[in-house]
Each structure stands twice: as structure tokens, then as C-alpha cells.
Image (cartoon, coloured by chain):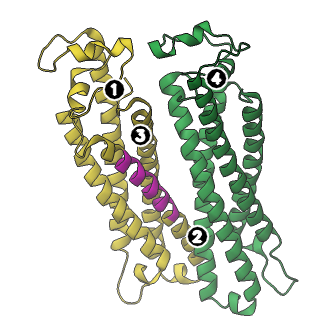
Chain colours: A yellow, B green
């Protein structure tokens, strides 16, 4: 069941007591090309799983980067209100910038893993790092976007938005983009949570 | 490794192809008392896992129930502002009430599972129901509390809080209790996520 690539990814670990349908991997060597049909299938599934994570990372990066740019450029002359005078908008910008940087790093780690078959950090560190940061940053981003939404609604009630409606529209767009980024970060966190559970149960990040 | 109780909990399922250290469970019958030492240990671990979930549910229920009561009773005569005039505060109340009801139901389901050894719903439905609702409600509650925080900060800047500071203090307490409820709901969602992953990987909600 386990592919040679999986075997190569677990280098440095002592083999755990294995169920019988996994036994043949001790006899295999990953430079040989005697891969049975199942292993090829496993490798394909594995690559699809990693590609899916990469796509989610890319989407999260795009949306959160766009959101932080929209928020950052939201100042129109001295008459208009400035975004950094509102703490909820500062929170939106900071959370989106953090998520954009993190997603960029995770995209690099993901490409590394797809191309080389090993994780960037040691495996145990990598799965917990990914999962922990996904969870925390997803909650952080949602919290920032909700706070921004509440502030934007209050500003509509006051006369700030009547005086400079472009400011409010641009802030709304930045918040909406942040919510889209949160959505994809949430999907990533589900997948990386599954990898952590695989690691706890099987001692490897692969479920195949 | 699998206990008789686990076996009883999987009634109605065809046994999946098992690794060798699980083979003895086909020969066991759960009315016999020939349980080896390992099975007793598994049952204990299982009960500890379920008890931990129950404790988190109880804490989430307590905090979100207290939060919704604090928000609901936050009206002091006709001169004071009323909580239901602010949409973010309505959101805080609604989210906390929903989470309190859901946690109450899940506590019943958890007690049922601990006492009888089977889930309230069929197993596949139960694990996905728990995980899905935990995730969605945790995000909902965090979103509501963040929006409430943003509104409370804005109100402090306006003169609403100077006129009736008790209103603002009570709203702050309700929001803080909501954050505590979110914390425990988030822990529950980690545990129920682990159960879902166990179910996907092993075909059972138990990892032991």
C-alpha cells in the first residue's frame, strides 16, 4: 500500500510494527522500479491531496493579499478619514497581512513537498506547525473580519460614510476579500487537521 | 486491542479486513469475561476521551448560557439604551443561545454514549454531525463575539457609555463569557475532528 515515495519520506525513523498488507515495504527499496499497481495509485492520490492543499493556500494568499492591499491604500487626501484611525480596520489589515505571509511560506513548503516527496521541516514538526497555525490564523482572520464588519456597519449609521462614501466602499471590499481568504484558510485547516490525525494514528502523515 | 465495548458499538457493520493484532476480536464475544489486560486499558482510555469531551461541552454550555443571560437582561429602564437596538449585540445573544442549546444536546448525546457504549445517532452520522456543528458554531460564536467587541469599543468612544456605564459593563461581561464559551467549543471541535479522522481512516470512531 505504501509507496516508495512515502518510504523515502519517512527516512530516519525506525519502522513501527506493521500490519501484514504493509509488510512488503520493508522488502522494497525505493530506487527499484518494482512498484505494484496499488502504489502508483497511492502516489497519485497523495499528489492530488497535496495539490488540493496547494490550491487552497494559493487562494487564501490571493484573497488575503488583495484584502490587505485594498485596506492599505484606503486613504484619499487629508479631508477623508484614514483607515489607521480605526482600530478594527488596523486589525483587518494586520490579520490579512499575517495570513498572506503565512500562506506564501506554506505554498513554498507545499511545492517543496510535492516536488521532493519530503517535508520542509521534519515531519512531526511540519504537520503540527501547519495545523496549529492554520487553526489560529483562521480564527484570527475571522475575528478581524467580523470586527471590521461591525465597525463598517456603525460607520454607515454615523455620517462618516455620507461624507466620503468611497472610503466605506473600499473598506467593505477589503473586508469581503478577507472573508474569502478565511474560507480557503478554513479548508486548508481541515486538510492539515486530517494530516495531524493521520500522523497520530498511523505515525505518518499519509493515510493511504 | 479493541475492547468488547468497542465491538458492541460497531454492531450492524461488516468487519473490515483487520491487521493481525486486531484479529482476536472476531473470536471474542462481548458477554464473556475473557477480556485481556489491553482491552481493559482501551476501555479506560476511551472513557477518558469521552469524559474529556463531556467536560468541554459542559464548560461551553455554562459560559455561553451565562453570556446569553447577561446579554438578555441588559436593559435598565427606558432611559438606558437597549441591547436589541444594536445588531452586533443581537448577534452575540443569538450565537450564544444557539451554542448553549447545541451544547446541551451534545451533553445528552455524550452521556448516552458513555453510559451505553453506543452513539445516539448511527455512528457515521454522529461523528460528522458533531464535527460539522462544532466547526460552524465555533466560527459563528467567534464572529459574534468579535463583532460585539468592535461595537463595544465604538460605544466607548461615543457618549453612550458615559450616560449609562452599567449597560456597557454588562455587555462587556457578556462578550467575555462568550469568548470563554468559544474557547471550550474550539477544544471540542478539535476532539470531534479527531474522531472524524479516526472514522475515515479506521472505519470506527475509536483510535485504540
Q: Is residue B87 above or below residue A131?
A: below
Secondary structure under tag 4 reads helix
Per the rendering, the mark at residue A179 is: none
* Label 1 element class: loop
Q: Is residue B15 visible?
A: no
Which mark is nearer the camera, 1 or 3? 1
Discs 3/2, front: 3
Q: x, y (%) of residue B45?
A: 59, 35
Disc 2 versus disc 4: distance between alpha carbons?
Answer: 48 Å
Q: Residues within 10 Å of mark 2 (few under 14, many from 20)?
A: many
Judged from this view, the residue extending furthest toward the left is: A31
Q: Which quadrant is the N terminus of chain A positioned in?
A: top left
Q: Mark 2 falls within which chain?
A: A
Which residue has dot 2 on it?
A: A150
Q: Is residue B2 magenta?
A: no
Answer whether labels 1 and 2 touch (C-beta < 8 Å). Answer: no
* Closer to us: B165 or B106: B106
Secondary structure at numbered mark 3: helix
Q: Chain of mark 4?
A: B
From the image, tell me which residue sits under label 1: A16
- Mark 3 or 2 closer to N-term? 2
Distance between mark 1 and mark 4 Cα atoms: 24 Å
Q: Which residue is mark 4?
A: B6
User: Mark 2 falls on what kind of element?
Assistant: helix
Q: Residue at x 64, y 23 (%)?
A: B6
Identify the residue at horizontal 70%, vertical 15% (top origin). Answer: B30
- The quadrant of the rendering that contains the C terminus of chain A is top left
Classify B206 as above or below B179: above
Q: Measured from the top left, where is residue B95 in percent x and y?
A: 69, 57
Whole-angstrom CA distance, mark 3 to mark 4, is: 23 Å
Quarter of image, res B116? top right
Query: Residue, x 69% and y 45% (percent of image)?
Result: B54
Amino acid at each position: 500500500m505504501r509507496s516508495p515515495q512515502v518510504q523515502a519520506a519517512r527516512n530516519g525513523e525506525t519502522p513501527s510494527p506493521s500490519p501484514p498488507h504493509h509488510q512488503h515495504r520493508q522488502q522494497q527499496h525505493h530506487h527499484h522500479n518494482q512498484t505494484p499497481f496499488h502504489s502508483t495509485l497511492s502516489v497519485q492520490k497523495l499528489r492530488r491531496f497535496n495539490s488540493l492543499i496547494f490550491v487552497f493556500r494559493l487562494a487564501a494568499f490571493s484573497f488575503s493579499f488583495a484584502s490587505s492591499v485594498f485596506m492599505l491604500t484606503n486613504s484619499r487626501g487629508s479631508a477623508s478619514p484614514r483607515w489607521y484611525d480605526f482600530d478594527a480596520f488596523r486589525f483587518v489589515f494586520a490579520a490579512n497581512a499575517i495570513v498572506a505571509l503565512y500562506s506564501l511560506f506554506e505554498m513554498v513548503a507545499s511545492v517543496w513537498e510535492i516536488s521532493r516527496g519530503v517535508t520542509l521541516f521534519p515531519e512531526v514538526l511540519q504537520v503540527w506547525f501547519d495545523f496549529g497555525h492554520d487553526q489560529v490564523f483562521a480564527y484570527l482572520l475571522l475575528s478581524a473580519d467580523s470586527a471590521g464588519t461591525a465597525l463598517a456597519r456603525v460607520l454607515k449609521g454615523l455620517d462618516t460614510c455620507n461624507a466620503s462614501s468611497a472610503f466605506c466602499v473600499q473598506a467593505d471590499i477589503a473586508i469581503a476579500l478577507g472573508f474569502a481568504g478565511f474560507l480557503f484558510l478554513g479548508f486548508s485547516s481541515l486538510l492539515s487537521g486530517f494530516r495531524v490525525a493521520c500522523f497520530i494514528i498511523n505515525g505518518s502523515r499519509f493515510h493511504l
